Each structure stands twice: as C-alpha cells, then as structure tokens.
Image (cartoon, grey):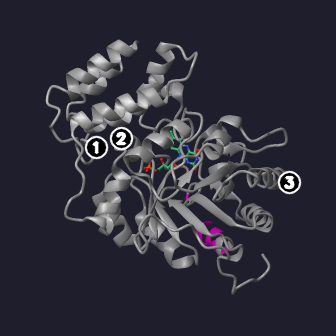
Amino acid sequence: MKPDPAAAPATKLPPGHIPATPLSALAPMQDVTDLAFMRVIAHYGAPDYFFTEFFRVHAQSQPEKHILRSIDENTTGRPIFAQMIGEDITHLVRTATALLQHPVAGIDLNLGCPAPKVYKKNVGGGLLREPGKIDEILGALRACVPGLFTVKMRIGFDDTVNFDRILASVNHHRVDLLSVHGRTVKEMYRSEVHYDAIGHAVSQVRCPVLANGNIVSAARAATVLNDTRAAGVMIGRHAIRNPWIFRQCREAFGENPAAIFRPTLGDVREYIERLYRATSVPGLLERLHVNKMKKYLNFVGQGVDPAGAFLHDMRRTESEAALFEVCDRHLLADPTREFAAEPYPGVIARPNCETPSGLADGCSLETIVA
Ligand SMILES: Cc1cc2nc3c(=O)[nH]c(=O)nc-3n(C[C@H](O)[C@H](O)[C@H](O)COP(=O)(O)O)c2cc1C
C-alpha cells in the first residue's frame, strides 16, 4: 500500500431526509430488495439511501437486467447505490464503469456475504481472508469511480485479525461510506452483533460508517448509534417485518420523538396487500407468488402474535385466497391491536437466515418457503 495519509473522502454523500440527523439505509438483500420492494418501503417512509442486491461480477458477467431496473426505474425519491460482488479486478472495473452509465448514487463493494457457495469462490466475505487483495481491489475501484465509492463489510472471516488492515485500506483509498455488519463470516447470523467492533471502525476510518446487524427497532437504532457513534444505521430483515422502521427512526432521531408511529395489525394487513400487488408479475403462477410472499411474511409474522400462530397458518397456504383468509383471521380480528415494535422472543422467521445452506447471505427462496 503506497502512503496517502492526508487523503480524505472526495465526494460528499447525498444529504439525508433531515439534515444533521443520523442516516438510514435499507440493507441490500438478494431476492428481496428489488424494485417492487423498494417502492413499497418508500411508501411507508423511505430510508435515506437504498442499495441494490449484488451484481455478480466474473469474466462472463453482464449487469443483471432485473437489478438494473431497480436503478433505472427508481421512483423512491432517494439515491440508490449499486452493489457488486466479485474478486477479478478487470471485471470489477468493467462492471463499475458500466453501472456508472445508470443513475446510481455510487458503487458499493460487497465484502460480507457469508454463504459458503459464495465465500468459497473467494468473493464477498471470502475476501476478508486476503487483506492484500482487498487493498488492490479498493485501489482499482477508487481509480475508476470518480464519484462515491462505498464498501459493505463484515468484521472478519473467522476472527478480526485483518480488520484494522482493511480499515486502513478503506482510509487509504478514500472510501466514501462504510457499512459494517458487526459479525464475522463464520458467525453467519447466529451470534450477538459485536457493536464494539463497529465502534472501533468508527474510530479508525475517516468516512461515515453505517452500523448494521440486528437493528430491530428505532429504539435499538438510537442505542446502537449512541454506543458506536456511527453516522447512521443500515437495516435489513427488520425493515421487511416493519416497513415503517425508517419513518420511526427519523421520528426517534429528532423529527418527532414524542410521537413515534405505532402500526396496528390493520396497518400490517394493508402492507401485506400492497406487497402482494407490488410483487405481482404477469404470468407468475399463483402458487409461486404465494411462495414469494411467504419469504416476506416469515419476517412479518415475528411481530403478529407471541405464539407464532400466524406464521404456522401462513406457511400452510397455497393460494391467494387461503393466504388472505389467514391474514384476515389473524390481523383483522382485532385490527387496532398494536403490531409489536420488536420481534416476539422465540418467534423465528424460519428459516431464520441462520442456515448455511442458502444461496446468498444464507437465505434463498427455496429454503424460505420450505
Ligand atoms: C435474504 C438476505 C439477502 C441478503 N443479500 C445481501 C446482498 O445481496 N448484499 C449484501 O451486502 N448483504 C446481503 N445480506 C445481508 C444484509 O444486507 C445485512 O447485512 C444482514 O441481513 C444484517 O442486517 P439485519 O440484521 O438488519 O438484517 C442479505 C441478507 C438477507 C437476510
């Protein structure tokens, strides 16, 4: 690494909704954060930033058309960063250059995906074993991205031995924004999140840091921000469960701390219907559409009832009519009852992304609808 000690981030990040309050971002989630889902999230209160699911980069790859749609047809009113996963520098540079022809806020590099199928190819979280290679990649991408270049990482592969070296590369190559999921690759989604490690990253890098991992509510976001001093939060699974979470964060961060919006089960019923309509694609078989919905509802169900009865019944449906009958029975019997602000303890979004068998970050449609 050539010394470049005075280098500071070159380009300003797009402003958040409310100046001088912590930032929020929807975490990239493969097969989840597509155009339809981002539009639904924006309806309930968009985060400051969106990230695409990852574009796979290798010798034969071309940016996936369905992911490009989430950039080209972004009507959320908020900036979107295009995320790439790969390890071949020539093709990462080629892909970043191609993605910059689209209306992206910046280019993001995935250094966190823990799925064995992915890390065994030495991409995503696999790269965390090779800080020298990461330094080369960051250098090449920094040189070809004139605007914002961002990184999303876990804190290590099976330990944090390379963490400081990678954070030094983040500084050296003037990365503009760093999102840190506070777990190692080997910890998958099982362990507690090491917020102290996120705090350490905040103390080491010059760019703003987004804290990520198990931010289940606006209250938890405020605690994590206080503990880590991060510039903002990145939220994934808990935005699927609770699409109001970014609005609630803004209220908690200062817009209206006295009146944080509290959705009811009736509101959740409306969210499910909106999601069903948004994810409807001409020609999609009803059974497959219902299965796709189960992927989201596995998370939503964590806030419906403490016994997991909604989840139990929802998972057994096979048609639109049966799915909405279950929704009506569980959500409209007492529609003014509050939707839990945090998941009920012990109600698991099966599969809970703790299975190592999934495709991307431990989750796949197949496992989710099993
Ligand atoms: C279904 C699913 C797909 C994911 N896909 C990606 C991805 O494409 N890129 C990425 O950087 N992280 C991906 N992740 C990881 C999330 O961005 C996030 O780091 C992780 O879920 C922890 O945040 P959370 O506790 O708020 O969900 C995925 C996670 C899930 C659950």
Task: Give, as a three-letter code, the residue at label 1.
Answer: Pro
Percent across and percent down for residue 123 are 70, 48
Residue 32: in sight, yes or no? yes
Q: Which residues are magenta?
A: 159-168
Q: Earlier in the sequence, mark 3 or mark 1?
A: 3
Task: Give, as a three-letter code, the residue at label 2.
Answer: Arg
Q: Which residue is mark 1?
A: 343
Disc number lying in front (2 or 1): 2
Label 3, label 1: how many angstroms apart (C-alpha)? 43 Å
Tag 3, which secondary structure?
Answer: helix
Percent across and percent down for residue 231 are 46, 70
Q: Earlier in the sequence, mark 2 or mark 3?
A: 3
Tag 2, which secondary structure?
Answer: helix
Label 2, label 3: how many angstroms apart (C-alpha)? 39 Å
Disc number lying in front (2 or 3): 2
Q: Quadrant of residue 167?
A: bottom right
Q: Quadrant of residue 336?
A: top left
Asked whether the beta carbons under mark 2 and mark 3 sit within 8 Å of each other, the answer is no
Q: Which residue is mark 3?
A: 90
Q: Earlier in the sequence, mark 2 or mark 1?
A: 2
> Which residue is painted at 40% across and 41% down in the image?
240
Q: Which residue is mark 2?
A: 241
> Which residue is painted at 15% across and 25% down in the image?
333
Q: Is mark 1 within 8 Å of ligand 1?
A: no
In the image, is residue 320 above or below residue 157? Answer: above
Q: Is mark 2 within 8 Å of ligand 1?
A: no
Percent across and percent down for residue 321 are 34, 13
Q: Quadrant of residue 138?
A: bottom right
